[in-house]
Image: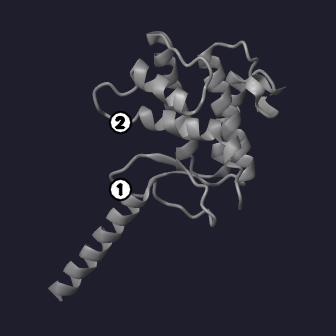
Amino acid sequence: MQFNHDNMTGVRLAADLANLVVEDRPGTGEVREIEAILRRHEIRRPVLTTRQAGLLRVWGVRLRAVFEASGSDERCAVINALLVERTAGAFLTTHDGLRPHLHFTPEDDDVVGRVQAATAGGLAIFTIEAEGRRLGVCARQTCVTVFVDTSRNGRRGYCCARCGNHDAVHRHRTRQAASTRR
């Protein structure tokens, strides 16, 4: 399956916000960090107040449930709840000289509303294109990173090659130890 990576801002932003809120390190989700994520995803006017950053941290927790869903039905139900709560319809736009694309809230909405609508809408579109699959949590037992699987075969189980390699080495060493004990 081929994905148009230009149309994936909402789903990738959703993953970044969902990952931001689980890390137990000081400063996680502070205003500047969230603004950096928004800039990386080319969100217009990404300046936040402390209150807005807090709202986006809470939204990240809600987004995480989409990636953790046990199947298509559960994933669709979670996304539908987000769509009902944070989208105002579909709006075709060409702002800033961009080719026509969809927004799920009016362009004059504040940054929090635009991010919430973009992530809910982006997750919905990606879920349709991916037939309810291709969103997940890393299979490495000690990793909780969520990811968007755009691989050719759609069987990605790890957030990154490092986690996959770590698990492969762990499995190899476990087998080696078991065969040595025999």
Residue at the (71%, 62%) spot, across then down: 1
Residue 175, percent from left and from top: 27, 79
Frontmost residue, 49 versus 123: 49
- Mark 1 or mark 2, which has the lower sequence index? 2
| Quarter of the image where one finds residue 30 | top left
Residue type highlighted by circle 1: Gln
**Residue 97 shows up from this direction:** yes
Frontmost residue, 172 versus 75: 172
Residue type highlighted by circle 2: Glu
82 on left or right of 35: right
| Quarter of the image where one finds residue 2 | bottom right
Residue 49, percent from left and from top: 48, 10
- Circle 2 packing at 10 Å, graded few (<14), some (14-19), many (20+), is few
Residue that badge 1 annotates: 141
Residue 135, percent from left and from top: 58, 50
Residue that badge 2 annotates: 23
Residue at the (66%, 40%) spot, across then down: 123
Q: Are marks 1 and 2 in contact (CB under 8 Å)?
A: no
Residue at the (28%, 68%) spot, across then down: 170
Q: Secondary structure beneath disc 1?
A: loop
Q: Is residue 166 above or below residue 35?
A: below
Q: Secondary structure beneath disc 2?
A: loop
Frontmost residue, 115 versus 139: 115
